[in-house]
Amino acid sequence: MMPNSSFYAQWKMLLCFSLFVPALQAQTVDFIRSGNLVEAKAKAKETGKMLFVDIYTDWCGPCKMMDREFFSDPEIAGRMNAFFVNLKANAEGNGSITARQFETPGYPTMVFLTSDGSMIRKVSGAPSNKTGFLVLLNSILNSTNVGEIFLSYEKAWYSDLRSAEIAEAYLGLRSRYQMQNEALLEEYLQELPADSLDNPGVKKVFTRYAATLDGKTWEYLILRKNDPRCAVAIKRIIDTQFKNAVAEKSEKHLARVLDAVANTAPDPEYVVHRQATLKMQFYLDTDRPERFHAVAAGYIPDQLLPLLKTEEDSVRLQQHTRILESIAWQYAEFVKKKAHLTQAMDWLNQCPEKAVSTDFLAYREAIARKAAQ
């Protein structure tokens, strides 16, 4: 049973956009810190979001508590970033004009405005705990159509109506707003009876909204890695986590991605190629061509060239050829050290004729010209 038919229709419209939302998980509230109310109002009007203004001072204890306990909480941050443009205004600094405009009686003062700048509520003082702040946020959300829809599904999620359909609807909206879902997925998985784990609706929830490389939901997918839908979800998660590793420039995060490849790959040969190509891409994307070359030096002569020379299957030969073409292009585009380019030329010259393509020849020529400069 869905909360009601009107909400269900609107949820379907919202959900269609959530399937393409990247798995970027908000950890803290994204504040505009200029103190400029005009700037914040313009952004609220542009995005259609409500506006939240946190008026504070540097010496205010409750203000610091809110920063520490509320605005850094993932659940609060997810809601505030989803539904509000958030402005911090230092009443004794860059937000003094904003503070005077709202006739601030004390600190902190929280102001909630509609997207067109109309007052919804002004609150002086800090709630005593996270629950109190969430109650305040939810009361504001209830004044908007999208917020009312979200809270309706949240209420259903925490009731006895937690079917696969409700799970898909609620987690879909959270995904749409880039809120963290993993803890809720873990909770949902633990409550499911064993004989329902492979129901199509249940499987759809986990394959669509799982996002991390650990926990029970990841184990759920690994146990079903031969299922096409689970295999697609695994690849999505690995690809997303690889992008996160690059963004963080974190070799530790990369190591977790490589372990995930090893635990989910269809065969050992795939593991070798996938891990090597991911490592090379990581070092190029993080501007470390020396490390890229070090990986290539252990992969091309020892793994890739022997396969190209002995492979009889035309499909696999084409796959391996494309890997070599990609590496040749990477050397042509990104590597500058002549010794590395010369060594790459030596490897490429060993490529068997059956694996040579027009693109391969073009990249090899480009490397030769670069090495000769």
Image (tube, grey):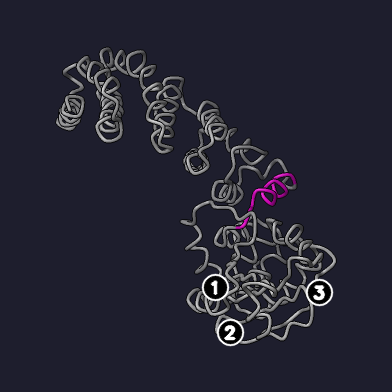
> What amino acid is at disc 1?
Gln
Query: Are there few (<14), some (14-19), or many (20+) residues within 10 Å of tag 1?
Result: few
Q: Mark 1 points at which residue?
A: 10
**Residue 128 is drawn in which quadrant?**
bottom right
Marks 1 and 2, how far apart at CA: 25 Å
Marks 1 and 3, how far apart at CA: 36 Å
Task: Give the mark toward the camera: 1 or 3.
Answer: 3
Instruction: Where is residue 372? Give x, y as percent.
Output: 17, 24
Q: Mark 3 points at which residue?
A: 125
Query: Are there few (<14), some (14-19), or many (20+) residues within 10 Å of tag 3?
Result: few
Q: Main secondary structure of the magenta part?
A: helix
The stretch in magenta equals 179-190
**Residue 29 is drawn in which quadrant?**
bottom right
Instruction: Where is residue 9? Give x, y as percent.
Output: 54, 72
As helix, strand or loop, the secondary structure at mark 1 comes to helix
Q: Name the residue under label 2.
A: 117
Residue projecting furthest to the front: 92
Which of the two labelled residues, at mark 1 and mark 3, occupies the earlier sequence position?
1
| Residue located at (63% from left, 55% from top) | 164
> What amino acid is at disc 3?
Gly
Task: Give the mark toward the camera: 1 or 2.
Answer: 2
Query: Are there few (<14), some (14-19), or many (20+) residues within 10 Å of tag 2?
Result: some
Seen in the picture, residue 323 relative to 173 is either above or below; the reply is: above
Instruction: Where is residue 242? Give x, y as percent.
Output: 49, 39
Marks 3 and 2, how far apart at CA: 22 Å
